[in-house]
Amino acid sequence: MSAVVIDFPYREDSAQLFEALAHQPWAAFLDSGRPHSEQGRYDIISADPDCVLVTRGEQTRIQRRDGTVALSTDDPFQLLREALGPIVDGIDGIPFCGGAIGYFGYDLGRRLERLPSLAEDMEQLPDMAVGIHDWSLVVDHQERRSRLVGQNPARLERYRRRLLRAAEQTGKNRPAADYRVLGEVCSNMTREEYLASIARIKRYILDGDCYQVNFAQRFSAAAEGDPWHAYSLLRQLNAAPFAAYMNTPYCQVLSTSPERFLEVRDGLVETKPIKGTAPRGEDPIEDMMLAEMLKNSPKDQAENLMIVDLLRNDLGKVCATGSVEVPELFKLESYARVHHLVSKVQGTLAPGKDALSLMRACFPGGSITGAPKLRSMEIIEELEPHRRGVYCGSIGYIGFNGDMDSNIAIRTLVHSDGITRLWAGGGIVADSDPEAEYRETYHKASALLDLLQRMEQMNSERCG
């Protein structure tokens, strides 16, 4: 069946529309950050998938809308390819006309690499949670145009009416949703433990095991209430072009990622690794100075180049010979709380390869593992006390037309079983300053930590 397209009234803030769907199981909002950021272009909203694929360890559960369930131990990437079906033509100007939306957790990498099992799996969340969506609302902020796209006209009309009602309610007095942090936000390691782990990584580098390891700490706090309310505030504090909100039966994912992992558009491939971070300044002069220092930092450039080389190699596994290139190196990008160094690697998929071939070849992303990838992942498993789960995996879509866009799931909160968790880390290299690396994790997590502290303060005032 060819896709049906219905024009829908454009709204600058798509979050006001998604709110009508936010509490449905498998509701998904791929968020450009507009109107709080000008860097993204498209928002994608959907819910009520035709089929969901949930991978835990060696097993994938496939459940359809009619309730039928199948279990498989086959490669989850191949199972997802089969669920998407043969590639069909897309529609010009609409990046997503239905397909897969979901998350691929960092620990899905265990299906691709043989890793030790040392870190504790506290969250017990799926390694992959993806829905196959046969409808979506696509908002193009550049063209200031919104369109509903789907395979089932009756379902599309039902969601059109529901979203129109949501648009009509915008600005009216509705009861405020609540999200409450109930206690102190704690890390899973002390400052001394973090610094000791960095010393251990530097010893591995000196011994020739690796060149760079991305090492992270995890923060957590007890919380209750509506995670969508928390995300609504977070996207204002830390707007980002690859943000996302997902409501699954297992957890809610609140991501304000600035980093693109993999994009495929008509067979052309792009990845934009971030390596190199500096805090924003207190005033314009200090801000410019910090940005220039980052842009010209030999250490940060070397760190970035290591990951660019790793990703060139990963893309080369599935791209046409000679097509992989680096059109941008060490570009400065500035966000609400930090400056970043960003590079761009591009290529063209080889015949017989598709978006899932690319995802499989590159997963997890090199910018959040280190180099070489496998040894870095082994060291991460040894030194980080808990599994990463969604963090440092990827959130995004793969369309029925074979196109894909995805983030690196950094600057991400995960709420499950009354606990909210977030992570922050950085690339450790031979000349890393341990104290500076420790401080950098707080710069990166500042917006998320500020959000939790604000929620904790509001709860204390309410109780007091």
Image (cartoon, rainbow, N blue to C red):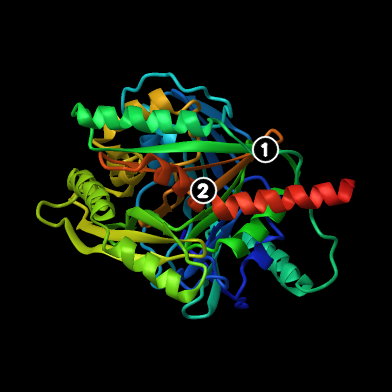
Dot 2 lies on which element?
A: helix
Q: Residue furthest bottom?
A: 143
- Which badge, 1 or 2, is on the more N-terminal residue? 1
- Left-right relation of 24 to 44: right
The mark found on residue 302 in the picture is none
Residue 287 occupies which quadrant of the picture? bottom left
Can you say whether 59 is above or below 242 in the image?
above
Residue 136 occupies which quadrant of the picture? bottom right
For the point 18% across and 29% down, the residue is 208
- Which class describes the residues within 10 Å of circle 1: few (<14), some (14-19), or many (20+)? many
Q: Which residue is mark 1?
A: 221
- What x and y, as percent, mark residue 188? 55, 31
- Which class describes the residues within 10 Å of circle 2: few (<14), some (14-19), or many (20+)? some
For the point 42% across and 19% down, the residue is 117
Between 441 and 373, the residue placed more toward the observer is: 441
Q: Which residue is mark 2?
A: 442
How far apart, in angstroms, are the residues tagged by discs 1 and 2? 16 Å
Q: Nearer the viewer, mark 1 or mark 2?
A: 2
The answer, for residue 333, to whether it is visible in the render is: yes
Dot 1 lies on which element?
A: strand
For the point 47% across and 23% down, the residue is 119
Between 271 and 432, the residue placed more toward the observer is: 432
Q: Amino acid at mark 1?
A: Ala
Between 302 and 10, the residue placed more toward the observer is: 302
Q: Amino acid at mark 2?
A: Tyr
- What x and y, as percent, mark residue 456? 74, 47
Can you say whether 94 is above or below 317 in the image?
below
- What x and y, as percent, mark residue 49? 58, 48
